[in-house]
Image: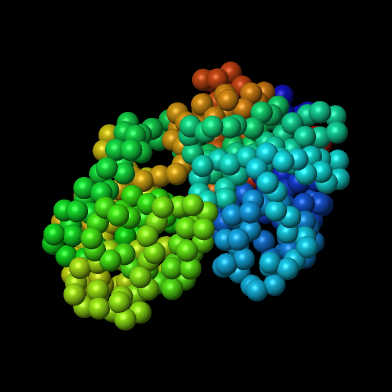
Amino acid sequence: MGMCYPIDVAMPGAVSLGHDIVCDGFLLACKARVQTHVHVDHMGDFDTSKGFQDILLSRATHQLICLERNAELPYRSNLQVLAEGSAYSIGESTVTLLPNGHMLGSVQVQVELQDGRRLGYSGDFQWPLDRVIVVDALVVDSTYGNPASVREYSQAECETGLLELVHRQLARGPIHIFAHRGTLQRALQILSGNVESPLLGSRRLCREVHLYRTFGYAIQPLVATDSDEGIEARQAGRFIWFYGTGDKRPVDIGEGATISLSAYFARRDDPIMEYSERAYGVALSNHADFNGTLAYVEATGARFVVTDNSRSGKGYELALEIKHRLGIEAQPSSNFESKEWGRGPLDSGA
């Protein structure tokens, strides 16, 4: 049962692992915050954490945050960069971070308490993974917690489908591609060297792509949309324009087609969705689907699971499926209340 494991998720998404560590949120009682990655829904109260806690994160996440946020971050002594697999002790807890394949710098979190209990948090994760945290109790992402959220195609098929779609549409005019950070850079890897048209982006996105290149991503440099080369490409009408997190999206693209890279609302049997002759979706995703989520839970060896209900609303469904399919005790986080589940494990006095 979960009473022996002090794990939970509080609003608006702060994941607590024991009494020293909180992930992707702020809890005043915790000595340290782990920042698993830089997606906006995991950055809640980051500025508050800066003033009260040590912040533990991977080197890539540290550099992405420093690129995007205020200039004093690189000099703050309470931002602690942890090497992959290394142990860091704080209070009565030892923290270890392992990659989870979601985006550059993203990590799983393992916390070992002084009595030997191991607590973990998946973060947003891809499946399969080369290394998985081994824990007694786990907080797991529930983005694809519904049994219907199963993809009957591989991500390799998605990548091939994207490349073929881009080639077809370029014959008709320019293309505008919308994606979240991580998925966008993956698309750039697919297209780099495989299309002749210029790849355009904002100056903000150009800086971000340059950082990805320093971490070994095989991406050709983006052309800034407001540079002489970018303006010339736009006037010629043959280009691929990328829009990422923080970029203003056009009200009217004019000529050409749009492609949205997301697995949300995707068909389970086809990675390409045609909304119209000029608008498409491609289910390129760095998230494990429902089957991958169950496989990950099994691989951790967890005996108790809390499903994160703060970001997807699928925590209730996933907890039921983990119990019924895997025989592992599970319940949604305490920011989900119902007559059946009541409150979460920390509110029980664990």
Look at 60% across and 44% down and name the residue there: 107
Q: Quadrant of the N terminus?
A: top right
Asked if residue 126 shows in the view, the reply is: yes
Its colouring scheme is rainbow
Looking at the image, which is closer to me, 150 or 188?
188
**What is the x, y in percent for residue 155?**
36, 38
Farthest left residue in view: 172
Look at 37% across and 52% down and name the residue there: 189
Asked if residue 331 shows in the view, the reply is: no
Placement of 80 over or under 340, stated as above or below? below
Q: In which quarter of the image is residue 327?
A: top right
**What is the x, y in percent for residue 238?**
20, 68
Left-right relation of 326 to 264: right
Left-right relation of 222 to 94: left
Looking at the image, which is closer to me, 66 or 289?
66
Placement of 278 over or under 284, stated as above or below? below
Look at 24% across and 67% down and name the residue there: 239
Q: Quadrant of residue 316?
A: top right
Left-right relation of 23 to 262: right
Placement of 148 over or under 161, stated as above or below? above
**What is the x, y in percent for residue 158?**
31, 42
Q: In which quarter of the image is residue 120?
A: top right
Total marks placed: 0
Left-right relation of 255 to 123: left
Q: Quadrant of the C terminus?
A: top right
**What is the x, y in percent for residue 34?**
69, 50
Look at 19% across and 72% down and name the residue there: 237
Looking at the image, which is closer to me, 290 or 75?
75
